[in-house]
Amino acid sequence: MSEYGFDPKLILTSLVTIYSSFVDYQGFIEYVVKDQRAFKLENFEKFFELKHRNKIHIGYSHYSNFTKFYESAKKAFEDFKEKCVILNFFIYIY
């Protein structure tokens, strides 16, 4: 893919670095989760799999913060799904 100027590992590492920098901003995490076009927990889990297999290298502080970001995003995603179910229920009734 490098012949096309596309390096998926670099993009993934860059996103992880950005997300890890916003770990303390719950509002940002909620916006990330609500962007259903781009947000998928599987992509986050893929990062952890690649990191575990030493396919991606990232500093400890970013890794630690991203782990916290992931946990917060997972919880925010569950809350978001629950709100969507409740909202869809009320829309269906009316």
Image (tube, helix red, strand yellow):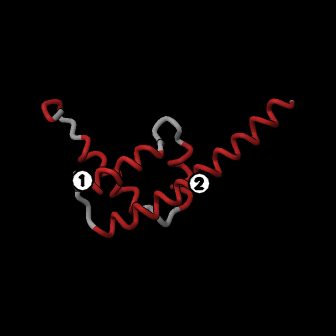
Q: Quadrant of the N terminus?
A: top left
Q: For marks 2 and 1, give the CA distance.
A: 26 Å
Identify which residue is drawn at 15% across, 35% down. Answer: 2
State the mark number for residue 69: none
Residue identified by numbered label 2: 76
Residue identified by numbered label 1: 56
Q: Nearer the viewer, residue 84 or 31?
A: 84
Q: Amino acid at mark 2?
A: Ala
Q: Is residue 21 above or below residue 13?
A: below
Mark 1: secondary structure: loop
Within 10 Å of the Cα at label 2, are there few (<14), some (14-19), or many (20+) other Cα atoms?
A: some
Residue 8, by quadrant, is top left
Identify which residue is drawn at 21% across, 36% down. Answer: 6
Identify which residue is drawn at 33% across, 51% down. Answer: 49
Within 10 Å of the Cα at label 1, are there few (<14), some (14-19), or many (20+) other Cα atoms?
A: some
Disc 2 and disc 1 in contact, CB within 8 angstroms: no
- Mark 2 or 1: in front is 1
Q: Nearer the viewer, residue 53 or 87?
A: 53
Q: In the drawing, does residue 15 fall left or right of residue 2? A: right
Mark 2: secondary structure: helix
Q: Position of residue 17 (x, y in %)?
A: 33, 58
Outermost residue, bottom side: 61
Q: Position of residue 38 (x, y in %)?
A: 45, 38
Q: Quadrant of the C terminus?
A: top right
Q: Amino acid at mark 1?
A: Ile
Identify which residue is drawn at 75% across, 35% down. Answer: 88
Chain-order first, disc 2 or disc 1:
1
Q: Position of residue 20 (x, y in %)?
A: 39, 61
